[in-house]
Amino acid sequence: MGGLFGRAALRGLRCGLRAPGPGLLARTCSGGPSWTRERTLVAVKPDGVQRRLVGDVIQRFERRGFKLVGMKMLQVWEGYNVVRASRAMIGHTDSAEAAPGTIRGDFSIHISRNIIHASDSIEGAQREIQLWFRSSELVNWTDGGHPSSVYPA
């Protein structure tokens, strides 16, 4: 994966700074910023499953506000800037270089046992999602008019 983000960028993501980018699906809200909805494929690798870390991984994505839209011992997440944000949440491929607080920084024990895979780009996510899921297996979330929704209508 390489060093995708420096510490300053990682802090920026934690503090809510978002860089707009192209998305898989886009919807805009009137009178506000343009929100781009992306989907990404995240797979907990066998070592993560064996160590019973699936729930911890799911919890981190849910706490970040992303929506689980499909699951087959691997997860597809959807949300604003999800591809880039998930790469920052996961951390460096090499566990020795992964920052504390990232999934790999907290749970990975070796580069060959680094817990998790995530798509590296929007295009990669589209390709990987199509390999693992039929469109009928994915949920299309709506906010249902709930004011507490993370995403604007």
Image (cartoon, rainbow, N blue to C red):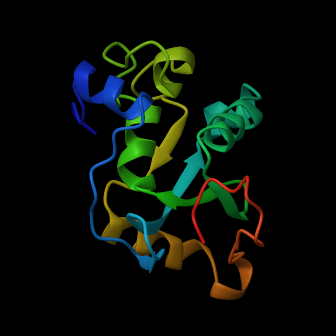
Q: From this view, report whether residue 96 is shown above or below residue 123.
A: above
x, y (%) of residue 128?
Answer: 46, 69
Q: From this view, report whether residue 150 is shown above or below residue 48.
A: below
Front in this rendered view, residue 83 or 134: 83
Quarter of the figure that contains the C terminus? bottom right
Residue in the picture at 77% in, 29% down: 52
Residue 100: name its quadrant.
top left
x, y (%) of residue 15?
Answer: 41, 28
Front in this rendered view, residue 44 or 70: 70
Residue 98: name its quadrant.
top left
User: In the image, 141: left or right of 35?
Assistant: right
Residue in the picture at 42% in, 74% down: 126
x, y (%) of residue 2?
Answer: 22, 34
Residue in the picture at 53% in, 59% down: 79
Quarter of the figure that contains the N terminus? top left
Residue 109 appearing in the image? no
Residue in the picture at 26% in, 29% down: 9
x, y (%) of residue 117?
Answer: 48, 46
